[in-house]
Image: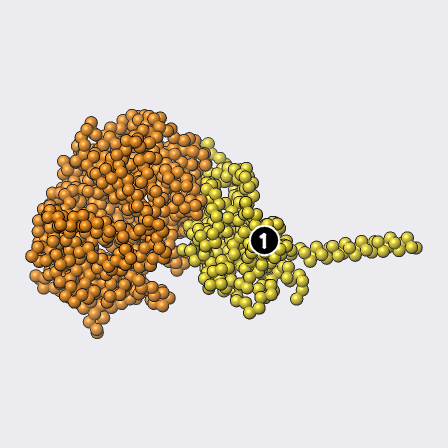
Chain colours: A orange, B yellow
């Protein structure tokens, strides 16, 4: 669901086909019939952007028919915990949760807490700080998580999570699913039946999603909804279960583990804020005094990271150089940065393996932003559009960018490809796999490692001798990686990520050995162990035919080579496998330890009946039947008492741009989503606003197997380009007839942002849906093309505007509304006139779409933008 | 042993027949189209390994097939077939939707027309869509789209994908008609063109019952799949099979592949895919069985494959026999005539 796995992840899809050959039933829930559907047992269509309504329907089906795996739910989730009396659900507030602040368009989550735990700090930051994202995989701080939490193990108490869940999803009936998603009841029922039938003691079901779920204004809650189902059915921590997050391309998992994100440090430690003047203050914000689990040891992870960064310079006396870390004081994410570029607040920009002129939402905004910089560094395999926008972007034709006047100085560095450098890829199973360098990079092509090592070296040489305090963080860095022939050793970097015991110089065996006293260093605590015993564990290549199903000697999986996360849940509270068929790890009473096919994700010798002393905290506070060892209460969260910016439970909200009124609540769309209300970022009207009919169709975009994301790696290659040589737009036969579109003829798709032309594909794979007694048509395009390459074409992402999920600041680029017209689009000034005409007809102003709380009358835009732009 | 056996029918040891002694077992491909995901990795891997040139940046409009057919510059070709028909018990998710009639007949008809007007006539395009029997066609509807209740709308759909390749026939028409000896039977039982010997006469092109082998424009020499002869020498499997993520293309010893394929067909039948059948596996067929055979989910014509391929040389003995009879008759007539005159 939300994944076109066969096309976007064909190599991983071999395992789906292998499962199918062994009897697994494969269901594909997607707006269009794709190559994944072609291989599935059933394709289940739905309207783009309605997945929570669908998943909520499945949750309601499970709860209404008592189909949950009750023993698992009671023992391992927070189903029995009682929530505060003043918590109000969307059922009570017509689509809003308690704590909504109209002025900030943000929630104060304090009323969502458990009844018996201490008050949280409150949601003072609003959305700008995105505390949930900051806390990453660690989950939010839950003070009191290690203490006794008021609960009703019978799940009958009206304020227990289970009953709240039941009430919250009661209105997600098959009829409402059909009226919202357009999915016929029979098909929806088939999914419910297959999912529940294949879950329980003897069976497990896996859920796969990709960016089709994440790129929505309520995307984080899509994943929450899927996780709730998997928890209710006992499909987490068990073989064959799980929620598979298929990433956008190779090693995106790695680039969140060791992040390229502005608000995270390695291992999902949050980036400090200006409030954190000392390490102690920072650590207090990361962990609670009284909480369970391994995040309690965040001091050891942080100090070891600082020791890796600043080496001998980091001492207990100087707070381990904590003061050297940069601080963040708001949203510095990619979209906000681009708007700041347009507004003249940003002077320089590095692009490494990224082509925002094509690959990011609202390509025009991206290009106009980049055209307003002092300098831009682009490192890529080819001269991508983001390096040449100043001379050949679509804005040249419209006169919005004039090459002679464009002030941006662009530095292009040719990059070495993945076969021309060594290193690791981390894939969706959290597995690190080492790559050897196959060939020397040609000409001036260099690895990223080379670039940054030498950039750091040169900057440090320039600053040498500086007495300025602000240069100390750079000058004091332990910038001493092993270098062979000018090229830094990637193995040495991996070794330092693994960490070492600084008293002996030995590589650490894992994060359990990290210390907070400065005697260990570690570049990423969750990766500790990847170089255990001085051996590159990621380079292991023992064939799967020479080991068991879990292939523990192929590559290395964080943490500690555990292949299935939270696998303690594969055994019952007494430590016995739920069933022989689904045995993974279990308690061996004779030897007094956990054992099994996988590395146990649990303290090895803690018996299943262990009850910690009342004052224990951290790992010591985990009971013998608390499988979720990273959670501050040891339980999986059906209901999130804090940590999410838009509610403790997933709720169906319409996309920011939708042809339909939300049939569930007066609240139309996510009330906490980030909207910007700028003239250069117009939104379409959605109900209850008028004139939505100007853009009557649902638009969605995705990938083709034959191309790679923004095309930098495929559009210049003849062997790939010839396989999908041209941009096309897929329409159903019904829409083709409605709009007079001919197969292989031209059409252009129009939004308030852009008009994009493409060849028409009329195909039975697209079908209209009936939603709220209206027929709705969906339009699909692949987004790989741009102005360069063998076949230059329009940029599909120009059609989208910028509206963001409040938790993770990801753009809603999987759904918008649009119009489609036959023929080619106008060019130059005529194009701008067409867009003006559409905006006028739809009555679009910068205010359109900014009334985020439709139950109220206030509009809201994110702060900090040039006011003149809105006038 | 008879001459007839060498020109058609089963041939248990095709390499020995070609004069190889102490040769390895015959190898080939079993392409199981029921697990093909249409990723075209086979096409790319083949081109990369064998240095086959780009074949044109043409949007063909035949579903996701922009290769069109096997040819001198495409030694692997993935066909994509969209049809208004069910596939086994698969649910295409159309039931109950406000659909109108299918557009497949119109789009494929349009594409077929375009192809026939194309520079090379479109005749080389193996996936020219089939016309369906008229009684199966839904009458075009003049209702507004979506105005239908669903009952009269399209409800069936399937999307078939299949990677086609040279069949490496037991009796290879191309090899039999090659006058220069450029085409030869390898010790692995495969059929390979030697580029340095080929004179570009093109007899092989008309000799192939599948339309596989083709002369490269601008060069003139015949080109086709070599079963990665060079890789086989190094103990490697062919590039396409190596690249195939779902093991749709399986490489191995032909005898073993045939057993595996038979089991797979049985398996699919049990799982409610009665359409599954093998193509090119039978040594009794018109080419003595293929070194590259397929599991298909419908009649071969659906995939652009000939239903009953026959090696042209199969008729050779008969032709010689008829020629001999004709000559004898002529001789007899002449004898009779002259004899008569003598009388």
- Where does residue A642 sit, x and y in percent of width and height? 16, 48
Residue A855 position (above or below residue A62): above
Residue sitting at x 39%, y 44%: A716
Quarter of the view holding residue A365: top left
Q: How many marks?
A: 1
- Where does residue B17 sit, x and y in percent of width and height? 61, 64
Residue sitting at x 55%, y 47%: B219
Q: Residue furthest bottom?
A: A590
Q: Residue furthest front?
A: A465
Chain identifier of the residue bearing label 1 in the image: B
Classify mark 1: residues with Cα within 10 Å, few (<14), some (14-19) or many (20+).
some
Q: Which residue is mark 1?
A: B198
Quarter of the view holding residue A176: top left
Residue sitting at x 30%, y 52%: A447
- Looking at the image, can residue A66 be seen? no
Q: Is residue A378 left or right of residue A97?
A: right
- Quarter of the image for the C terminus of chain A: give it: top left
- Looking at the image, can residue A827 be seen? yes
| Nearer to us in this view, A32 or A384 | A384
């Amino acid at each position: 669901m939300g994944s076109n796995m066969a096309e976007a992840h064909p190599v991983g899809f071999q395992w789906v086909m292998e499962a199918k050959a062994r009897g697994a039933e494969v269901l594909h829930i997607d707006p269009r019939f794709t190559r994944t559907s072609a291989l599935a047992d059933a394709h289940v269509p739905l309207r783009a952007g309605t997945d929570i309504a669908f998943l909520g329907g499945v949750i309601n089906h499970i709860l209404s028919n008592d189909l949950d795996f009750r023993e698992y739910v009671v023992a391992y989730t927070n189903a029995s915990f009682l929530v505060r009396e003043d918590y109000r659900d969307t059922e009570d507030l017509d689509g809003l949760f308690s704590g909504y602040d109209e002025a900030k368009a943000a929630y104060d989550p304090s009323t969502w807490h458990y009844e018996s735990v201490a008050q949280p700090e409150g949601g003072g930051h609003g959305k700008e700080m995105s505390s949930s994202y900051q806390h990453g995989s660690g989950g939010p701080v839950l003070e009191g998580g290690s203490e006794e939490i008021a609960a009703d193990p019978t799940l009958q108490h009206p304020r227990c999570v289970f009953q709240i869940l039941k009430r919250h999803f009661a209105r997600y009936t098959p009829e409402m699913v059909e009226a919202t998603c357009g999915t016929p009841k029979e098909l929806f029922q088939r999914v419910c039946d297959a999912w529940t039938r294949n879950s329980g003691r003897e069976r497990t079901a896996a859920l796969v999603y990709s960016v089709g779920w994440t790129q929505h204004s309520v995307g984080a809650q899509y994943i929450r909804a899927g996780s709730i189902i998997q928890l209710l059915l006992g499909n987490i921590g068990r073989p064959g279960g799980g929620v598979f997050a298929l990433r956008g391309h190779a090693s995106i998992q790695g680039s969140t583990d060791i992040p390229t994100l502005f608000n995270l440090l390695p291992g999902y430690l949050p980036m400090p804020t200006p409030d954190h003047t000392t390490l102690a203050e920072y650590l207090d914000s990361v962990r609670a005094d009284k909480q369970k689990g391994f995040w309690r040891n965040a001091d050891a992870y942080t100090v070891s990271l600082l020791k890796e960064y600043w080496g001998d310079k980091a001492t207990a006396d100087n707070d381990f150089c904590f003061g050297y870390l940069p601080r963040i004081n708001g949203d510095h994410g990619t979209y906000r940065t681009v708007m700041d570029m347009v507004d003249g607040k940003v002077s320089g920009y590095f692009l490494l393996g990224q082509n925002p002129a094509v690959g990011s939402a609202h390509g025009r905004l991206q290009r106009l932003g980049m055209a307003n910089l002092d300098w831009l560094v682009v490192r890529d395999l080819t001269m991508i559009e983001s390096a040449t926008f100043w001379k050949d972007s679509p804005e040249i034709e419209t006169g919005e960018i004039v090459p002679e006047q464009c002030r941006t100085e662009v530095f292009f560095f040719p990059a070495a490809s993945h076969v021309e450098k060594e290193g690791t890829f981390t894939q969706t199973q959290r597995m690190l796999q080492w790559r050897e360098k196959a060939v020397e990079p040609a000409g001036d092509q260099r690895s990223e490692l080379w670039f940054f090592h030498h950039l750091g070296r040169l900057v440090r040489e320039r600053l040498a001798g500086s007495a300025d305090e602000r240069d100390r963080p750079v000058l004091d860095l332990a910038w001493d990686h092993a270098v062979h022939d000018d090229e830094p050793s990637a193995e040495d970097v991996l070794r330092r990520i693994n960490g070492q015991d600084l008293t002996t110089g030995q590589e650490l065996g894992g994060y359990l050995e990290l210390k907070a006293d400065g005697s260990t260093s570690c570049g990423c605590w969750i990766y500790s162990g990847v170089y255990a015993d001085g051996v590159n564990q990621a380079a292991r290549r023992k064939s799967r035919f020479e080991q068991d199903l879990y292939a523990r000697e192929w590559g290395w999986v964080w943490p500690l080579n555990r292949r299935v996360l939270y696998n303690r849940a594969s055994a019952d509270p007494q430590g016995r496998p739920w069933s022989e068929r689904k045995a993974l790890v279990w308690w061996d009473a004779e030897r007094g330890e956990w054992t099994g096919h996988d590395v146990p994700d649990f303290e090895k010798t803690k018996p299943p009946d262990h009850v910690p002393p009342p004052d224990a905290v951290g790992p010591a506070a985990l009971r013998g039947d608390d499988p979720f060892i990273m959670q501050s209460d040891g339980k999986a969260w059906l209901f999130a008492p804090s940590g999410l910016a838009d509610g403790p439970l997933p709720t169906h909200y319409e996309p920011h741009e939708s042809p339909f009124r939300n049939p569930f609540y007066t609240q139309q769309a996510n009330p906490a989503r980030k909207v910007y209300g700028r003239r250069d970022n117009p939104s379409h009207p959605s109900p209850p606003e008028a004139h939505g009919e100007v853009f009557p169709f649902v638009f969605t975009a995705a990938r083709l197997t034959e191309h790679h994301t923004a095309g930098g790696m495929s559009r210049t290659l003849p062997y790939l380009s010839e396989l999908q040589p041209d941009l096309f737009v897929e329409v159903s036969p019904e829409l083709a007839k409605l709009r007079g579109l001919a197969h292989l003829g031209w059409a252009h798709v129009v939004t308030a942002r852009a008009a994009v032309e493409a060849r028409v594909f009329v195909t039975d794979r697209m079908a209209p849906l009936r939603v709220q007694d209206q027929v709705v048509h969906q339009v699909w395009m692949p987004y790989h093309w741009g102005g360069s390459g063998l076949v230059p074409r329009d940029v599909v992402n120009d059609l989208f505007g910028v509206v963001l999920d409040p938790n993770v600041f990801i753009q809603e680029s999987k759904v918008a509304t649009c119009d489609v017209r036959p023929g080619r689009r106008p060019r130059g000034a005529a194009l701008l006139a067409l867009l003006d005409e559409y905006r006028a007809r739809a009555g679009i102003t910068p205010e359109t779409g900014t009334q985020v709380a439709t139950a109220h009358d206030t509009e809201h835009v994110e702060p900090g933008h040039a006011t003149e732009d809105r006038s | 042993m008879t001459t007839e056996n060498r020109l058609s029918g089963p041939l248990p040891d095709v390499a020995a027949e070609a004069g190889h002694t102490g040769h390895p077992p015959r190898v080939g491909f079993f392409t199981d189209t029921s697990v093909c995901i249409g990723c075209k990795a086979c096409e790319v891997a083949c081109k990369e390994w064998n240095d086959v040139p780009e074949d044109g940046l043409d949007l063909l409009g035949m579903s996701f097939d922009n290769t069109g057919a096997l040819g001198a510059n495409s030694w692997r070709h993935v066909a994509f077939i969209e049809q208004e028909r069910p596939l086994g018990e698969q649910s295409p998710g159309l039931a109950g939707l406000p659909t109108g009639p299918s557009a497949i007949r119109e789009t494929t008809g349009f594409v077929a027309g375009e192809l026939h007007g194309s520079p090379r006539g479109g005749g080389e395009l193996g996936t020219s869509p089939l016309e369906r029997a008229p009684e199966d066609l839904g009458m075009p509807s003049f209702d507004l789209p979506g105005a239908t209740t669903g009952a009269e709308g399209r409800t069936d759909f399937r999307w078939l994908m299949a990677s086609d390749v040279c069949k490496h026939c037991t009796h290879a028409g191309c090899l039999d008609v090659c006058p220069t000896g450029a085409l030869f039977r390898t010790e692995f039982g495969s059929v390979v063109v030697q580029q340095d010997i080929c004179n570009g006469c093109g007899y092989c092109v008309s000799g192939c019952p599948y339309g596989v082998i083709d002369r490269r424009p601008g060069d003139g020499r015949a080109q086709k799949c070599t079963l990665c002869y060079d890789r086989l020498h190094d103990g490697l499997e062919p590039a396409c099979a190596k690249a195939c993520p779902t093991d749709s293309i399986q490489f191995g010893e032909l005898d073993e592949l045939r057993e595996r394929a038979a089991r797979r067909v049985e398996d699919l039948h049990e799982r409610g895919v009665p359409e599954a059948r093998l193509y090119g596996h039978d040594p009794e067929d018109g080419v003595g069985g293929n070194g590259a055979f397929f599991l298909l989910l419908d009649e071969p014509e659906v995939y652009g494959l000939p239903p009953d391929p026959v090696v042209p040389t199969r008729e050779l003995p008969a032709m010689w026999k008829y020629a001999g009879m004709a000559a004898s008759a002529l001789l007899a007539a002449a004898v009779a005539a002259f004899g008569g005159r003598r009388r």
